[in-house]
Amino acid sequence: MAELATIARPYAEALFKASSSDLNGAAVWVEALQEIAKNAQLQQFSDNPNVTTAQVFDVIAGVAKVALPDMAKNFLRTVIENGRLNALPEIAEQFRALKNAQSGSSDAVVYSAFAIDGAAVADLKVTLEKRFGRKLNVSVELQPELIGGIRVAVGDEVLDSSVKARLEQMKMALTA
C-alpha cells in the first residue's frame, strides 16, 4: 500500500490551489476535519461495508464544530468517496505546510509544564520569531513531565530550556 504522504499530496495540492483566494478560511475547516478524521470510532464506522459514503459524510458534517462551506463539503465528499478518509490528517498537514511555505511562516509548538496565558504567549512569540528568524504560528501543549520551563519545536529544530533537560545535562556531566 502506498504511504499516506503519497496519497495525501495530490489532495493537499488541489485543495491549496482551489482555496488560494481564502487560505486562512480553508485552514480553519481543514483543521476541524483533521481532528474529526483522527477519531478511531469514525475510522471503524467508515470502514464498515454496510455504511454508505453519504452516512459517513452526514456523521462528519454533523459533528464538525465549524460551519462547512460548499468547498469543504465537496472536498469531504471526494475524500470519502475515494476511500481516503484515513489520509485526511496527512492531507491537512501537507495543506498547512503549503500554506506556511507561501506565507513564509512555520508552525511552532511550545511544550510547557504549566498553562501559559495569552499575553505571555504573545511575548514568547515575538522572542521566538527573532530567534528563529521567521514568522511563527505558535500553539501551546502541556507536558507536566517537563517539571518547569519550556521546549519549543519549530519543524526539525528544537529549543529545550526545560528543567527536565537541564537535569539530564547535569546527570550527563556528573556521570562522564
Image (tube, rainbow, N blue to C red):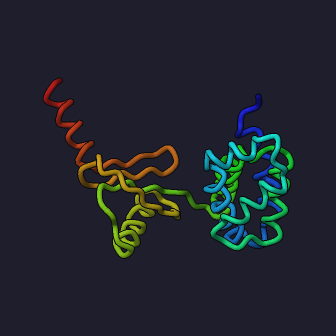
Instruction: From this view, report whether residue 64 is shown above or below residue 171.
Output: below
Q: Residue furthest bottom?
A: 119
Percent x, y for residue 112? 33, 56
Query: Which quadrant of the rendered structure holds the N terminus?
Result: top right
The mark tally for this picture is: 0
Q: Residue furthest left?
A: 174
Left or right, 113 with reference to 90: left
Residue found 51% across the figure and 62% down from its top: 136
Instruction: From this view, report whether residue 84 is shown above or below residue 119.
Output: above
Q: Residue furthest top?
A: 176
Percent x, y for residue 72? 78, 65
Q: In this orientation, which residue lies closer to the viewer: 82 or 105? A: 82
Query: Which quadrant of the rendered structure holds the C terminus?
Result: top left
Instruction: From this view, report whether residue 135 is shown above or below residue 45.
Output: below
Left or right, 126 with reference to 13: left
Percent x, y for residue 40? 61, 45
Residue found 85% across the figure and 46% down from its top: 82
Q: In this orientation, which residue lies closer to the viewer: 68 or 109? A: 68
The quadrant holding residue 123 is bottom left
The quadrant holding residue 120 is bottom left
Instruction: From this view, report whether residue 26 is shown above or below residue 161.
Output: below
Residue found 47% across the figure and 61% down from its top: 139
Residue found 64% across the figure and 64% down from its top: 103
